[in-house]
């Protein structure tokens, strides 16, 4: 019975882990259409603002950066559970207009990067 359980576990979990290509961290994003253009919100918990780069090319907005583990651990500390990804990240979004002439500003608070894209003149 225990060998059957081990074979079942291997069949369920190992092929996915061994056969899957590495997928980099892609921060979650929300896109809102506003009267002036768009607001894009990126979820970036634990990312320092100086580690963020935002690029606009045509109708594509691309966010790049890295999240680092900045906690100070005591001597003798060993990992018990690791789920947070500390690594380089990239996320691109295609919007339905050319952004190269848009007025773009951003704010960063509480782990959220808010990008304001003004594509139209205010009325």
Image: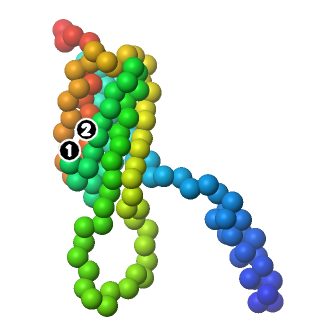
Q: Are marks 2 and 1 in contact (CB under 8 Å)?
A: yes
Task: State the separation of the CA atoms marked 2 and 1.
Answer: 6 Å
Q: Position of residue 52 (x, y in %)?
A: 27, 45
Q: Position of residue 87 (x, y in %)?
A: 39, 58
Label 1: few (<14), some (14–19) or many (≥20) C-alpha neighbours in 10 Å = some
> Mark number for residue 108?
1
Q: Quadrant of residue 85?
A: bottom left
Q: How many marks?
A: 2
Vertical side of 81 occupied by 18: above or below: above
Which residue is nearer to you in this view: 85 or 1?
85
Q: Is residue 106 left or right of residue 37?
A: left
Q: Position of residue 122 (x, y in %)?
A: 19, 12
Quarter holding the C terminus? top left
Q: What secondary structure is marked by label 2? A: strand
Q: In the image, what residue occupies the spot 43% across and 35% down? A: 92
Q: Earlier in the sequence, mark 2 or mark 1?
A: 1
Q: In the image, what residue occupies the spot 38% across and 85% down? A: 78
Q: Quadrant of residue 20?
A: bottom right
Q: Position of residue 27 (x, y in %)?
A: 40, 48
Q: In the image, what residue occupies the spot 54% across and 52% down? A: 23
Q: Quadrant of residue 91?
A: top left
Q: What secondary structure is marked by label 1? A: strand
Q: In the image, what residue occupies the spot 43% across and 68% down? A: 83
Evaluate whether residue 45 shows in this view: no
Residue where numbered disc 2 is placed: 114
Label 2: few (<14), some (14–19) or many (≥20) C-alpha neighbours in 10 Å = some
Q: Is residue 36 left or right of residue 27?
A: left
Which residue is nearer to you in this view: 97 or 23?
23
Evaluate whether residue 3 shows in this view: yes
What kind of colouring is applied to the model shown? rainbow
Quarter holding the N terminus? bottom right
């Amino acid at each position: 019975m225990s060998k059957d359980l081990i074979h079942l576990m291997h069949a369920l979990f190992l092929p996915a882990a061994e056969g899957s290509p590495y997928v980099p961290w892609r921060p979650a994003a929300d896109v809102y259409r506003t009267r002036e253009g768009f607001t894009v919100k990126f979820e970036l918990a634990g990312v320092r603002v100086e580690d963020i780069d935002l690029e606009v090319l045509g109708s594509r907005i691309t966010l790049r950066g890295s999240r680092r583990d900045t906690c100070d651990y005591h001597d003798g500390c060993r990992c018990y559970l690791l789920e947070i990804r500390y690594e380089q990240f990239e996320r691109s979004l295609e919007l339905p207009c050319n952004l190269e002439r848009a007025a773009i500003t951003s704010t960063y608070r509480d782990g959220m990067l808010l990008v304001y894209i003004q594509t139209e003149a205010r009325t």
